[in-house]
Amino acid sequence: MTDRRAVIEKVLFSASSHPGPDEIVATIRRYGVVLLKGAIAAAAVDRMHAAVESLERHLNDEVASGRRDAKDRDRLLRAGITGSHLEEDMLALLAELGPVVARHVEHYLGCGDLVVPDNHLLFRKRDQNASDAALKRGNRHNFHQDHDLIPGAFPFNVWVPLSAIDDEALGLSFAFPSTTEVFPVPVDIESYLENHSGFIWTPNMDVGDILLFHRYTIHGTYTTLKRPVPRYSAEFRVGTRSAAPETHLQFLRAFRRHQPTT
Ligand SMILES: O=C(O)CCC(=O)C(=O)O
Ligand SMILES: [Fe+2]
């Protein structure tokens, strides 16, 4: 696949043009990923961003007063705030995105009663320190598929930048052409690109844009190194309640098209 521009045009959608589930799902199946522009109100994203920054300030205070190890703070922010650390303002992401994304996921999975396991709902910070730490571990690209840690019952991924992704901040990168073959983690990206005449796409994104992709899509963060501005992001996975493994029943949160009226 060499026609980079043509491929990228295919995977860009604008929420204001109300793309249908048929079109979105066919594109995800064919290209591995969709970028949906303007999917969520910037004000809602800003509230989540503020919640993560407030938690970060709290962690910094704990480190300053000796109640928390700096390494532990860094690990939390890099690996992602999740599960019992999630706050109401962060969990609001599901209510915001359900009306936009749930119908596509229902179409992708062929059934309803969608759930998000909150132990795989993460809020992260990526900055140069995180890149340096990864590089030190010999992890140059961190390209991967989400097939190893996340059960197959939750095959649909949503990624949401909480701050703008531009040439100053680290975006999320995707490998084209897409695949459903399973590779070891981290994926040997150079070989993959060479063997498939592929390329890497790292889209700039405005606050409010989201990425949708499936569990075999090859993606990662570290190709665009030396970016001075920290990037905050959220990510979660969606599946159906009936397929959820017993180990995850305690973590499930409903992901609905419509908010229940109380
Ligand atoms: O945000 C990142 O750096 C990694 C995100 C990721 O791997 C994912 O959303 O599955
Ligand atoms: Fe991932």
Image (cartoon, rainbow, N blue to C red):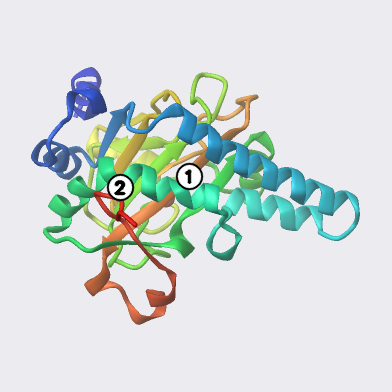
Badge 2: how crowded within 10 Å, few (<14), some, or many (20+)?
A: some
Identify the residue at horizontal 48%, vertical 29% (top origin): 43
Instruction: Report the residue marked by disc 1.
Output: 234
Pointer 1 residue Cβ closer than 8 Å to ligand 1: no
Q: Secondary structure at mark 2?
A: helix
User: Which mark is in front, 1 or 2?
Assistant: 2
User: Between disc 1 and disc 2, whose residue precedes?
Assistant: 2
Residue at position x 15%, y 31% in the image: 19
Task: Indicate the position of residue 179 as horizontal and vertical percent values.
Answer: 22, 47
Viewer-nearest residue: 135 or 128: 128
Left or right, residue 234 beside residue 35 = right
Q: Position of residue 62 (x, y in %)?
A: 83, 54
Q: Which one is nearer the viewer's eye here, 143 or 188?
A: 143
Mark 1: give few (<14), some (14-19) or many (20+) Cα within 10 Å. Answer: many
- Residue 147 location in percent, x, y? 34, 61
Q: Is residue 30 left or right of residue 8?
A: left
Query: Which residue shows up at 15% across the image and 43% down it?
Result: 25
Residue type at the position of mark 1: Ala
Tell me how far mark 1 sits from mark 2, CA to CA: 15 Å
Which corner quadrant holds the N terminus? top left
In the image, 44 versus 155, the foreground residue is 44
Q: Position of residue 225 (x, y in %)?
A: 57, 30
Question: What's the residue type where badge 2 is placed?
Answer: Gly
Q: Determine the residue located farthest toward the bottom in the rendered image.
A: 246
